[in-house]
Amino acid sequence: MRKILITLLFLLFGTSAFADCNIKSGSINILANDFPALRTFVETSKQCKGSADFKVTHSSEHNKIAVPALTANPSEFSARIAANSSIVPLMNQDLIRPLDDLVKKYGKGIQDSQLITIDGKVMAVAFMANTQHLYYREDVLKDLGIAIPKTYEEVVAASEKIRASGKMQYPYAAAYKAGWNLAEEFVNMFIGHGGEFFKSGSAQPNINNAKGVATLNMLKKLSELSNPDYLTHDSEAIKVEWESGNVALMTLWASRSGTLLDDEGDPNITKATKLTGPATVGGGNIPAATLWWDGFTLAKNRPDADAEATFRALAHAASNKKMVADASDQAVWLVEGFVPGPKSIGVIEAVKMGAKPYPMLPQMGLMHGALGSEIVEFLQGKETAEQALKDVEAAYISKAKEQGFL
Amino acid sequence: MPNKTFFWFFLPTGLAMILFIGLPIISTGIQSFYAQHDQIVKEVKKCDPFGCTVSIVVDNEETSKIREVKPLGKFNGFGTYTDRNHLAVDEIKKFWNETESFGAFVDQVTNLPFYKALIFTLTYCLFVTPNVLLLGFIIALSLNAVARKIRGPLIFGTILPMIVTPLVGSLVLFWMIDSQGIIGANIQNLMNDPYLSLKSSKTLTWITIIIYGIWHHSPFAFVVFYAALQTVPQEPIEAAIIDGASRIQRIKHIVLPHIYPVVTFVALISLMDNFRVFEPIIGFSAEGSAQSLSWLIYDNLVNEEVILFGSAAATSMMTIIGIAILLAPVLIRTWKEFKTAR
């Protein structure tokens, strides 16, 4: 925790971080998600490619491609930009290589806090942090004399007040699209209630309890204050809702703030859009949010020459002070030299408040998948919270048995 | 055609079918009987920018040893087929013993993912197929009756829904029924209910997808029926007109019996297509309210970070069996007719 604060707040020292860009051979092929900060990152690494081949695939479907593409030998990609959750399937299948030797040889400008180590081995190098936090419309809250909400209970009260005033019909928005997004909201809220997804030391589910019920009830309250189409809304859709002025309070990714606050759209809404930390819930003191890192991993099934070339190019970006200075509003960079701007408030607040990282467990993906489809009927009012949680656990157990976790 | 000629004529197609359809199905079938090996996990220290924790990872060294010996995984027999996410045999027995009324039992069963998907898939088939046949036939009859001059453009206009890519077609409709879209907003006005949303209600989502299905599939039935109508002999129709038969009587007694084999064909193809309904669910982002068998397969393969090959394979096999069961009555009938015709 202190490490990240130091990373984020104390900066600027250290020697010049320019990687040696004298790459002579090898080929580089990167698979990455598609949002502005990652494009900047990959572009920066391209400057260092030397005479190596350089290819990149930016795709929001990256999760679907990653495992099959890295399983092939030689694998299609030499590097995969992953996050807390997406590194897990790669680890489960043993598809990425340890980076210790390369870090020692070429990782001069990379800070220790950027290294993701598992069992003492460096498996990834992180370069940015992300979380979901609150956005609010300053003008609307001021008009109605509402204080900036700090808890989800206050978010509900504020939204009800806004609705009662007749200003907005659906004042709250969050990405509740059935599937991954909805499950992510459950994960956040459950962690905010102090929940643990698995019985300690095992893969047995542990969500059908009072904390799980409280989580579902809060999600339901919030969904009732959202656009009735909420089950079809992903991050992009609620961003559009916000930009058309239909929403006054929203939970959204920090990495989306860049495009939310750009020059496109109504300047009055953009001006009144303010960021604050994630909310807590149910009297808890840690935020109902998860911390995420984005970092690069190298494919195991690729020759050493490719791994070396790829690492050098990506390390160049992961230690690039110029990049983080130029693109300081695109992300919360974990790279040395980053000065947090107003758009980084959400992540910094989350870290200060002691937010937990998204659980990096081998079976978490199965739980996430089960949540995404089984809690829908509760939100639609067709099921009790207990029944929904029972369904999630049952669905998870079947899947975990098939995968050999139980 | 002599059998020998037929054999050589059919050989290339047959080989391609075995190679590209038969073998993959067999491989899927084998896969469905296997599950992953028991995961060997170990506790390790994990550090990231947010701090260090002790937690578990899969022990790759140990796992790869087991995998080398048995690459297919652990033999699971019908375990995957009968688990809760598929046929849920144990759960159904339990519900049967525990529930008081038949209604409560049905409620419990339809809450299971496989049966939920099966019910949507069957509902979709049962509503879309007959309507597609009916609508296609009516359009074909009407177009057959209009002046030849304007027939060309009309036919083109009619088959447009089939030309539009299913995903694009459903996305266009998806935006139109949004609570701020042209259809959605007008329905809200009409019903005088600002909270009405076509996308949030399960029933309305089902109706939307079914209407979309009819819209999308009718042109196929129309094209085939229209072609068949061109082969109806004129003499019996003229004779019937002289005998004073009405238009409906002519269709019922002359046209329909003539194109009957074609109707069977369209019904077969439609049923097969509809049983595999998938694109509209993605296009309408309707995963929450409507899941089909094909969607379950997709979900197992791509929607999770851990791919469930066994589950997906088992659902695929059951989809194939489902199609076979649905088609059986029509196929048996065709076979019988074929026998009597000889």
Image (cartoon, rainbow, N blue to C red):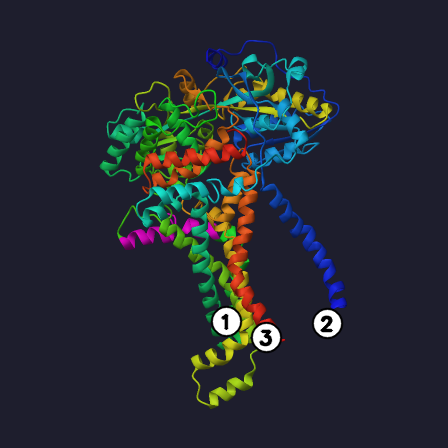
x, y (%) of residue A218?
Answer: 32, 31
> Which labelled disc corresponds to residue B1?
2
Bounds of the magenta segment: B170-191
- Judged by depth in the image, the label closer to the viewer, 2 or 1, is 2
Q: Are marks 2 and 3 in contact (CB under 8 Å)?
A: no
- Can residue A266 be seen at all in this image of the molecule? no
Q: Nearer the viewer, residue A240 or B122?
A: B122
The chain under label 3 reads: B
Q: Are marks 2 and 1 on the same chain?
A: yes
Instruction: Establish if B6 lies above or below B172.
Output: below
Element type at marker 2? loop
Q: Nearer the viewer, residue B333 or A39?
A: B333
What's the CA distance linking mark 2 and mark 1?
Answer: 33 Å
The residue carrying pointer 1 sits among few (fewer than 14), some (14 to 19) or many (20 or more) residues within 10 Å by Cα, namely many
x, y (%) of residue A393?
Answer: 42, 33
The chain under label 2 reads: B
> Which labelled disc corresponds to residue B340?
3
Instruction: Establish if B202 lies above or below A17.
Output: below
Give the amino acid at mark 3: Thr
What's the CA distance linking mark 3 and mark 1?
Answer: 30 Å
> Which labelled disc corresponds to residue B140?
1
Q: Are marks 2 and 3 on the same chain?
A: yes
